[in-house]
Amino acid sequence: MKNISRLRYFIYLSLLIIGGCTTGKKALQKGDYDASVEKSVSRLQNSPKNSEAMEVLKTAYDLALKDHLRKIDEAKMSNDLFRWESIMYDYQKINQLADEINSCPACLAIVPNPSKYITELAESKYNAAGARYNSGLGYLREKTRQTAKKAYYEFEKTLNLQPNYKDAKAKMEDAYWAAVTRVVVQPIIVNSSFYKLSADYFQQQIDQYIAKYTRNRFVIFYSEEQATNQKIVPDQVLSLNFDDFVVGQTYVKERVEKLKRDSVVIGETRTKRPVYGTVKATLSIFEKNISSSGLLDMSITDWKTRKLLRQQKFPGTYIWRDSWASFQGDERALSKEQLIMTRRKETLPPPPSALFLEFTKPIYNQLVDDIGYYYANY
């Protein structure tokens, strides 16, 4: 019973401590008036007669309101182009505090008429949108790709603040197309009809990548056919060519091993007792490697100036391997794994077109990584 009483005492004491922490008194002492109001409101919603929370709410709300109004007055007198956004923020906080108090009956007894600035908030939001709109127009007039990008983001912020603000949507569209880099990707040329299908498949992989590219909204890739059909004048041309490739270089290596094993039953005596001896065999292991490799050259050129902007070379190698074995002598001299290898026959390698495709796979991975890196923040 004594232990139970102690437990109840500690629980009661813990509740008192927790209650004190959630009345907002500590936040008030630190000058965080908004947090103090929010905590005292929360406390009064759960415990409407909490005297400490009542006292904190009355003081904290008055200080919070005065603090936000002071910041609003100071912002209105500043020369900051985007001052209306900070004004808007303070009006939003005032209205948010009012909504929290209005949702708490016990709080309304302490603050009967919390202030709300609906009209002022709407006006500040409209003025903030206007400031972003004017900033966007300024960037757009500079007529460079980088400033057009900045203009795009300013018009985007305008519409977030005030949907349908003037012609901000049309201006954002203008800014976008002024900021976009149009890249035409030329088809890969392989001077061999024998590998045309494999090269076409490699080209299709690249076409799919550029069609789905979304890493940078201000870069658009076009195939040469798309550019022709849509009459696109490119900003840059991305060219891909194999400097060189070799398919099907074959290397066969033979390794001969002399094997023997002792204590093997090689017969029996007249009395049927086993006779032990040594068995021998010659194992020939064949290893065939068929190597295919190539080097892809990527170059990015400015269409107007013909200036080379970037050039990278990507190597790729694929080695097809096969192994088998044969032996002469007593098979008991071989291990289990060696015996299995002797039962394996030489297999036909993949056709050259498949080998070509295999060595392009590591090239493709390097290529798309480099394209993604180069254009990520273009």
Image (cartoon, rainbow, N blue to C red):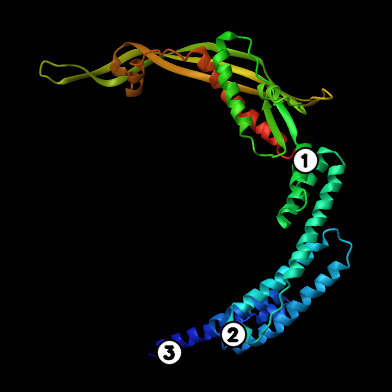
Query: Which x, y percent locates residue 31?
Result: 74, 77
Q: Nearer the viewer, mark 1 or mark 3?
A: 1
Under circle 3, the secondary element is helix
Q: Disc 1 marks which residue?
A: 174
Q: Nearer the viewer, mark 3 or mark 2?
A: 2
Determine crowd level at label 2: few under 14, some 14-19, many 20+ residues with C-alpha closer than 10 A. many
Q: Residue visible at 57% across and 89% down?
A: 49
103 or 62: nearer the viewer: 103
Q: Residue visible at 69% across and 85% down?
A: 58
208 or 12: nearer the viewer: 208
Under circle 2, the secondary element is helix
Q: Disc 3 marks which residue?
A: 5
The amino acid beneath tag 2 is Ala
Q: Disc 2 marks which residue?
A: 106
Q: Measure the C-alpha gap from mark 2 to mark 1.
A: 54 Å
Query: Which x, y percent locates residue 149?
Result: 78, 43
